[in-house]
Each structure stands twice: as C-alpha cells, then as structure tokens.
Amino acid sequence: MDLPAPLAAFFARRHWTLHPHQREMLERKDLPSLLLIAPTGGGKTLAGFLPTLAEIAETGHQGLHTLYVSPLKALANDIRRNLATPIEEAGLPIRVEDRTGDTSQARRKRQRADPPHILLTTPESLALMISYEDAARTFAGLRRIVVDEIHALADNKRGDQLMLCLSRLQTLAPGLRRVGLSATVDDPAVIAHYLARHPDPCPILHADPGPPPDIDILEIEEDPPWAGAGGRYAIPAVLREVRRHKTTLIFHNTRAQAEIFFHHLWLANEDGLPIGIHHGALAKEARLRVEQAMVAGQLKAIVATGSLGLGIDWGDVDLVIQIGAPKKVKNLVQRIGRANHRYNAPSKARLVPANRFEVIECAAALEAVRAGELDGDLRLDGPRDVLCQHIACVACAGDFAADTLFAEVKTVGPYSTLSRAAFDDCLDFVATGGYALRAYDRYQRLKERRPGVWGLRDPRSARQIRMNLGTIIGTDKLKVRFRGRGGQPLGEIEEGFAATLTKGDTFLMGGQVVRYEGMRELTVEVSPRPDKEPRIATYIGYKWTTSVQLAHRIQDMLHEMRFDALPQHTRHWLELQAKHSSLPEPGRLLVEHFPRDGRHHTVIYGFAGTNAHQTLALLVTKGMEEAGLDPLGFVSNDYATMIWGLKPMGDIRPLLSHDGIAVALDSWLKGNAVMKRTFRNAAIIAGLIDRNFPGKRSTGRQAAFSSDILYDTLHRYDPDHLMLRITEEEAMRGHIDFGRVELLLDTVGDRIDQLRLSRVSPLAAPMFLERGIVPIRGKAEGRLLEDEAAKLMAEAGLSLD
Amino acid sequence: MRNAHDFTFAGQRLTARATGALWWDAEGVLIVSDLHLGKSERRARRGGSLLPPYETEDTLIRLQADILETGAAHVVCLGDSFDDLEAAAGLAARPRDRIARLMAGRDWTWITGNHDPAPPGLPGRVADTLALGPVTLCHVATGADRPEISGHYHPKAAIHVRGRAISRPCFLRDARRLILPAYGTYTGGLRSRDPALARLMAPDARAILAGLPMVEIPMPR
C-alpha cells in the first residue's frame, strides 16, 4: 500500500524516503505473522509501526489498535518519544501511551477502561492486564501486536509467558496480526516459529544488514591487571576516547562494575566532561533524568549496563566501549548496534578487557564477529512453571474451559508438543496443589464449576495471584534514600547487602559515595560522603556466562598458542603459565593443586561454562566429603572451577569417573543448594510460594520460612510432585547443565593431567577474585563454627557451664 | 559433633537439643514451643498458596523421636501448638491418632498461645502457665522476676565464619529468661538483633544455636 497523504507529506517535508524493508512491511501488513530481521539503527521500530499509523490514518479506529511489547521499560519510554514526532507533525488522530511497572495505579485503571490506540508495554504488564475481568473488553478491537527485540525474549521465560499471553489475546481478538522485530540472529527460523501461532507459517523479512562494524580492542597504555572485572586501569584511555567522540556509550556486564567504574571515571574527569550513569537498580527519577539528558544531547558519555543494552535510539552515539569481555558474541553485536545508528555508516566499538584472561576472550570474540559467527541456543520446550502461572492468570479474568485453554496453549511454539496429561498436571497443581495427599478438597484454589469449566474458588485470591505474576525472580530489594524529610530516592540495594551494613559504612549508589545511617521503615537511609572511599557496592545482578561457542574458540586459541592477536603482557602471562604449570589442551583435562592461606586448592580447567563447572564441583566435593578431605567451598567461572579444603587431594581420577559421578548425581540432586535455588524460582513462578514484598513486611515479626523447608518436605513426603519434576528438568537444562559435564568427562576419559605446584599458578590467580563462592555445609564447616563460637565467648568474657 | 548442649538455668541442669527441644532431666520433662500444627491448612483456608500439606506429620514425627530418645514422662508444648483454633478442631484423623499415641502413658500440658488461646480439644492439661520448681513455663516472656521458660518469638541467630553467615534457630538465655526456638516444620525466625528480642534480653544474654553442631555464643545484637 502507499502511505496515506498526511504521512507521505510528513516524509516529504523531512526529505525521508522509506527503506525497502519498511515499504515491504507496509505491503505485507495483512499477514497473520511476520518477522523482521534488521540491524539496529535500520529503522526497525518505525517499520513495525508504519502499518499501524497508516491504517489508523486511513480508516480511524476505536479503542486499542496496536500493542507494542518490549523487554525493557526504557524502550517503551523511548518509543513513545520517537512516535510523537511523526504523529504530531502529520497531525494523526492517534493516542500513544505506555504502561509499565512505573505507571501509576490511577493511570493503569483508566487505560483499561479507555485504552489508547497504541499501548507500549512489557510482558509482565501485559500478563497483568490479561488477568483482569475486563480483559475481553480491553482487547476486543486489537488488530496488531508488535514484539520488539524478540531475540532477547525468545530464549527465556519472559518470552514464554509473553507467547502464552499472545495465545490468549488471539482468542480475545481473532483477527490479531503479529509482528516480531529482531536484531541479527543466527537462526531466524527458530524465532519465527516462536512468534507465529502454531502451526501457522511465519515469513521472515531480512533488511539489508548494512556495512560491517568497525570493532577492535581499545588501545590502552597501561597493562590490564592480573585479575578483576572493573577495567579501572583503562580510565585515562576511555576519557581520551570520550573527548574525541561526540557521544560514547560505556557498557559494563554488571551494575556493581558500572558503579565502581563511574565513580573512578568521575574522580579522573578533570575536564568536567558531562557523563551520566544508567542501570536498572537506580531510582526511576534518576534513570529518566539521564535518558532525557542523553536525548537532548547534553551528555558526552553514559556508563550503563544491559538496561540500556537493547535497541534504544539515543541520537548521536558514535562510539560504544565495552568494558569486560562481552561473554556472548550476540550481546556484543547488539551493543555495537548502538553506535552510529545512521543506517549506512559502520558502527564503531572498542573492547576493554578487564583482566588478562579477558584479553584472550575479547580476541576470540572479535575473531568470531569477523567470521560472522553468532551464538545462541533457543529452546522449544515450554517450561511448565510458566504454564502454571498462566493458568492462574487466566483464571483471574474469569471462568475458563480447560479444552479451550489447552488448545490455545498448543498454538504457542514452545508448548506445541505439550501433552494433555502434562497440561492436566499443571491444571491440577493450580487447582488443588497436586499433592498425593488430597488435603485441600475444601480449599481448592480452582473449582470445577461444571464439567471442564474452571474458576477461582475464592475471588479474593486473584489479588494474590496478580501480585505474583511475572517470571523475573529478583532478590529482595530495599529502597535507598537520603536521610531527612522528603529525602531524595537513589535506588535499591539487595536486602542481604543491607543486612551487612553498620552505621558509618560507605558504599556507591548512583555514582555517589554515601554513608549508611540506618534503616527506617524498610528504607535504607544514607547521607552523602563524597570525601570518603566507598567500602563496597553490591548488586548480585545478572552475571553473563560465556557462550559454548566462544568458550570453544578460546580453548582452541590457547591450544594452538595462537597468540598473535594478543598484547605482549597477555602473551607473557600465558608463557608463564606454560613454564610454571601447563596450558589447557582440548581432549585433555588440566588439574592443578597448590596450597594457599592454610588451605589445599584444586583447580579444574574444564572450559565447559559456569553452570557445568558448578555441577562438577558439587559432585567432586561430595566425593571429597565422603573421603574425609573436608572440602570448604568452591567457586566457578566459565573456564575453570576452584575447590578448597582442609586436606590435600590425592588422585582425582576416582572423583571424576563418569560412573561414580552419575551415581553421585542422583543422591546429590536431592540435597544440593543449586537444586534448592532452582526450586525456589520455579515455585515462585508456578505460584506455590509468594514473592517477598519487603515494603509490606512489618518489623518485629518472624520472616517467612525458607523455601528450602518446602523442598525438603516435598522430597520426604511427595517425591513425585510436579514441582520437583519441574525443578529437576530446569536444573538439568540450565543450572546443572549435566549434559556438558558428561560430555566433558567422556571426551577427556582418563587423559587427566594432575599437576602439583608449590603455589598458585598464573592462570589460577584470577579465581581468587571470582564472586559466587559456594560453601560446603559439611564437617569442616562445623569445626570452624565451633572454633568461632569459642572465640566469641572468650572475647565476651563468658564461659560455658 | 555435639547434638545436645547442657547448661544451668535458675539452678537447674537443662539440655538444649539440636532439634530445638529442651530436656529437663531432673523433672523428666521435654519442652517444645511453637509447633504451628495445621499451618498449611490454615493458609489454604484463607485463599493463600496450597503449601505441601505434610508439615503437621513431619513436626509430629520429629517430636516422637525426641520423646523416644529422652524417655520423657511429661511433655509441655509452650503455646502456638496449632496455627489457629480451627486448625486444631479440623485436625485430620491421622495426625490426631499420632498425637494420641504420643500422649499415651505420659503427662502432657498444652500451654495456650496467641495462635491457640483456648484449649485445643485434645486430651492433656491446658494452662496459661505452668510452675515447675523455681521456673514458670509460659508462651510469651513477661519480664517478671521469677525465672521463665517461654517461646513465641521464634528466635534465630547468625554467626559469621570466615565471611560466611550461618543462620540458625536458637535458644536465648540470660539469668531470668530462656526462650525456645520454634519447633514446627513450617516456621520462620526472628533475628536476635531485632529490637523486640534485644530489649527483652539482658546484655550478657547468650544464644545456643540449634542444628549441628550445637554452639553457644554471646547473643548477637
């Protein structure tokens, strides 16, 4: 179709012409689903909205026409601003609003009664809207749904939840057309399958990928440190680049690193360059201020994490700096997409490895980008905890027929092979708890009103279900604000971190050094202390894991000693490792033993990814505990795991034998901390346990009991329960990654090189700075506990009687 | 590894057990607090989550083990034995039988608590308080001068070992007060540093951590 006159006139005034893929989106606008693959900056979002603007301009529309869903709140804000220009200038009668977790209660309510033409939202907010009794009315006239950055949703539970919601919307609005917008991915067909109503086909539209990116490792005078993740050593070089470019985005992998880096960048910023910080734990006000300053061109640079990482159009960004190895080539490519989003100019990005191991990782990632290799593992098996939540969500909106809901769920790609029995298990779980002991006949959550039709027994439970919607499981957070009446909100910190603070401690928040003053009604009160050194900034945040493909490439580089692309210092480090210990070799397993700090350490270089290393370490430490070696703990990263204990380890082969490990796995699965964490997440998503709302908890009361107790109780009394089956599936697939442990052990066989060293090896040194230490709750811990208790009693002048 | 911890309170030799039960050998009394039987049922009745309905069974099985190991002649439950009165009244046949078997051949006292202020409709003696030797047994500590053994607060305490916090249910004690941890399977804890507990206990109070190994430390505040 041609553009309607007002839009055509707007384009002409701006001297804009449509990109070929934008024109094609218009022409194919009536397809039931269509996936657009375009590089960031390729006018992808406009391509998604043009058919909507054109349709409403031509024929007008009453009520909600297009729903836009993005994984990020910030993206919704950004799109609203970007749409305002064509709509206002072309004088179109179109109302655009956003609805996210930040939207006020009153506004949300009005949006349901009187929806705008275009509503911009997130998967979680959409699920909430679907749970309301008036959902059928709200969505009745819906014509199109645009899922932006669908590649970032297609491999996780947020995406699974969204697709389940889409299947519901399709019933409420049968003519609904789906459009997916994706950055470049290696397997578009998988994403298309994810987007379309199964078994409908989903055509894919490829935009011109544009010129190749200009990407390299940043030239830095100073050598990177032996270990660490912050990239502080690169600050002079980064400031130099910020001065040279119009606008620079500086990405970090974690919030804590972003905070620390920003703090030191600010201290070194003698020219007073305007630089801001943006991450998901900052208060909404602080985030918006930075976003607005950025759009207005008032900032020279912005230090950010993934909250800025997806396709937001920020104007004149001409350089992206990535601090720390990008972990996934896919992330790197998307972040590069931020720079120079003029469609036909190459994007420019520079990498700053934070330590010497990351130098190797960055070099491998660059090799991969140049080779056009992208990574990504997409799932097709829909997780059942998300399905349980969806069933409860649908029930909140009103009675439903199980047959209809099952048919809907089967149209969702990842759930297309779901059996009726598996669906019925989930329904039974939501209705009765699904226990072998049918204890809740009187108090079922769902009642079968007539054969095959289900609804909430107690309408009041809808509120509790709504409060627990969503698939992102965060740790409990506390708000931080300056002390005093109307103190300015700064953001959030994790409750566990807050518990470690005592009055006078200093930490970083939003780039400022603040002093902990105390707690007041579950808000952390602080005062500004710019003169003090921060003690620590902590967010557990999301920790990226190096992809399988990237890890392979790194191992190859090491094995072939392909060090040409590496700077002198890193080459030197690896040569030292070769001299004092040995370099890892594919097909063999390098294991180092050395004493340090009164402990016996063992490092296993598996190159199998963090999750697999964690599993391996759990199994090995179980064997150590049985052999009386008193393991104390371990820490894992993507290339190795380090275990320490009170006694030295002899031959490690028996602990690494495949059969032994497979047997150990079964008994161990039931009791380990990873399973319990997996259970907790699945139980929250499925609605077995409530999320914690720190703000709602009054002080002076006992905390809710731990989910570990539920896990242990289920194992003891109801070992076949659905939640335990879900937990095991999840764990084997994700956190446990047992498949890779098996692959490693099978590949290696008995080709294990066990080296005994007198001290820590060059390659092992960084392990001592890894976070996420897992303690072993065995005999050794008990002994240390007794020692510590005796010490405390003696210090207090108390004696045992 | 120590699974019991002996100490003297109000001139009496008492034993804190790793399970959270208190054994008074001279009197032949086993004391437990805050069983919260029927918690999952109560939660479901009120339209909340459908928790695994096994905690009543589990709590009673553990109590049975403590009774058999100590050979108690008298069991005192220090209140909040049931999560509410309806849970007590609606107790299923199986746990009811189990309780009856536990009660057979020994004295049993139900101290009333804030969750179960009236008698639970089971055999055994029901009382607000019970005097044993120089000590008063009651649900909530009163601050009276006479030595008291009580529950209610579900105290827990953390000890830091090489940068790692280990948090466990605990007994709290000073010269006049002894507070028991919650015994029920589905019970959470209140940190000893919470003002409610910090105010109640004397500056030289101690915490005995339940679980293995048992250790005694100055009460964290």
Image (cartoon, rainbow, N blue to C red):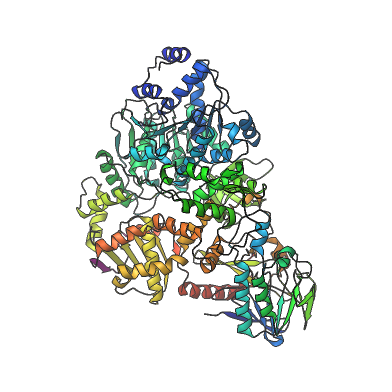
Residue that lies at the very extreme toward the front in this rendered image: A451
Q: Specify the quadrant of the image occupied by residue B54.
A: bottom right
Q: In the rendering, at what x and y percent does residue A260 appear? A: 46, 46
Residue that lies at the very extreme toward the bottom in this rendered image: B26
Q: For the point 33% across and 31% down, which residue is it? A: A347
Residue nearer the viewer, A245 or A562: A562
- Magenta-highlighted stretch: main secondary structure? loop
Q: For the point 50% across and 58% down, which residue is it? A: A722
Q: For the point 43% across and 55% down, which residue is it? A: A730
Task: Check the picture and name the quadrant holding the N terminus of chain A.
Answer: top left
Up-down relation of residue A358 to residue A655 (above or below): above
Up-down relation of residue A323 to residue A118 (above or below): below
Residue nearer the viewer, A752 or A726: A726
Task: Check the picture and name the quadrant holding the C terminus of chain A.
Answer: bottom right
**A696 sits to left or right of A331:** right
Up-down relation of residue A371 to residue A421 (above or below): above
Q: In the rendering, at what x and y percent does residue A274 appear? A: 47, 32
Q: Specify the quadrant of the image occupied by residue B6.
A: bottom right
Magenta part of the protein: which range? A750-764
**A106 sits to left or right of A188:** right
Q: In the rendering, at what x and y percent does residue A578 appear? A: 22, 59
**Residue A193 is covered by the magenta coloring:** no
Q: In the rendering, at what x and y percent does residue A85 appear? A: 50, 20
Query: Quick check: can you spot residue A529?
Result: no
Total numbered circles: 0
Q: Specify the quadrant of the image occupied by residue B78.
A: bottom right
Query: Quick check: can you spot residue A55?
Result: yes
**Residue A761 is covered by the magenta coloring:** yes
